[in-house]
Image: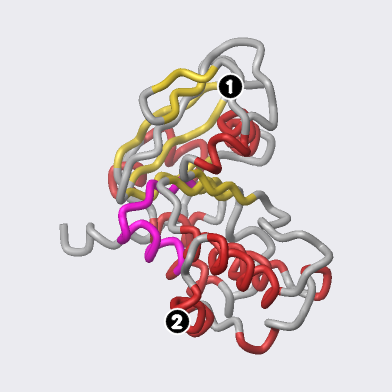
């Protein structure tokens, strides 16, 4: 149960919500987009407090939310999804580059139920790339994903970050999440702790003792040699 928890989405930053299964990471994201209503608290979106956030309204203002089932509808192929997004957001000239960047060619004509978890996540990131959101909230992007998909998912998230998007991901895949994160938020015991960069998080005694254990995660993109 969440008691006093919060997170911030910052432009050009990947923020990682980390914690054990059941700690409330996914719930926090769902509260932020209005899919779960909290007993207390408010959502601040673009400088405005939202007592009852609504996903469709926030989406129109530049939010892209993807849960573990990915942001795909079951009745259309990946190609159909991409074409629709490109048409709506006037990005038809960018489709080929997005397909190549995320290596989608071999499954463009499949519907979501015929995709692996990693393929669904890559397809969701392709939609986000065409959407060019101001903020992306992505729940467990690396969960149940094959090793071949992981670097492509990481690249998609980093590309959005590098284009100015505020990216927030949840997860407990330590190596994958730490490799891309700029900031780490620890979700535990109903609350949150801002731990700073992955390097700082890895040096936090309590986080290391209670969550990381003996594992030594990699540093993120900007910390090598620090």
Image coordinates of residue 28 in percent, x first then y, are 58, 31
**8 vs 64, nearest the viewer:** 64
Q: Nearer the viewer, residue 108 or 92?
A: 92
Residue 37 horizontal/vertical position (percent): 68, 21
Does residue 200 appear left or right of residue 80 in this picture? left
Identified at 47% across, 40% down, the residue is 61
Residue that badge 1 annotates: 190
Residue 9 falls in image quadrant? top left
45 displayed left or right of 74:
left
Q: Is residue 151 shown left or right of residue 226?
A: right
Residue in the picture at 57% in, 35% down: 57
Q: How many marks?
A: 2
How far apart are the alpha carbons under marks 1 and 2? 42 Å
Relative placement, left or right, of 173 versus 94 is right
- Dot label at residue 168: none
The furthest residue to the top: 40
Residue 58 in the image: x percent, y percent? 54, 36
Q: Is residue 165 magenta?
A: yes
């Amino acid at each position: 149960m969440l008691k006093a928890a919060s997170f911030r989405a910052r432009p050009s930053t990947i923020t990682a919500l980390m914690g054990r299964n059941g700690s409330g990471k996914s719930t926090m994201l769902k509260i932020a987009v209005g899919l779960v209503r909290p007993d207390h608290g408010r959502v601040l979106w673009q400088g405005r407090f939202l007592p009852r956030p609504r996903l469709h309204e926030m989406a129109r203002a530049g939010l892209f939310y993807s849960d573990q089932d990915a942001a795909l509808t079951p009745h259309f192929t990946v190609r159909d999804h991409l074409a629709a997004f490109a048409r709506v957001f006037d990005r038809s000239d960018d489709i080929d580059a997005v397909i190549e960047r995320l290596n989608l060619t071999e499954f463009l004509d499949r519907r979501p139920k015929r995709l692996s978890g990693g393929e669904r996540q890559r397809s969701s990131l392709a939609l986000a790339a065409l959407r060019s959101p101001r903020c992306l909230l992505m729940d467990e992007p690396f969960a149940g994903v094959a090793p071949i998909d992981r670097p492509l998912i990481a690249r998609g998230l980093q590309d959005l970050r590098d284009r100015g998007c505020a990216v927030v991901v949840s997860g407990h895949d330590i190596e994958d999440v730490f490799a891309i994160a700029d900031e780490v938020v620890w979700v535990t015991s109903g609350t949150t702790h801002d731990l700073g960069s992955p390097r700082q998080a890895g040096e936090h005694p309590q986080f290391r003792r209670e969550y990381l254990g003996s594992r030594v995660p990699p540093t993120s993109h900007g910390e090598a040699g620090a």
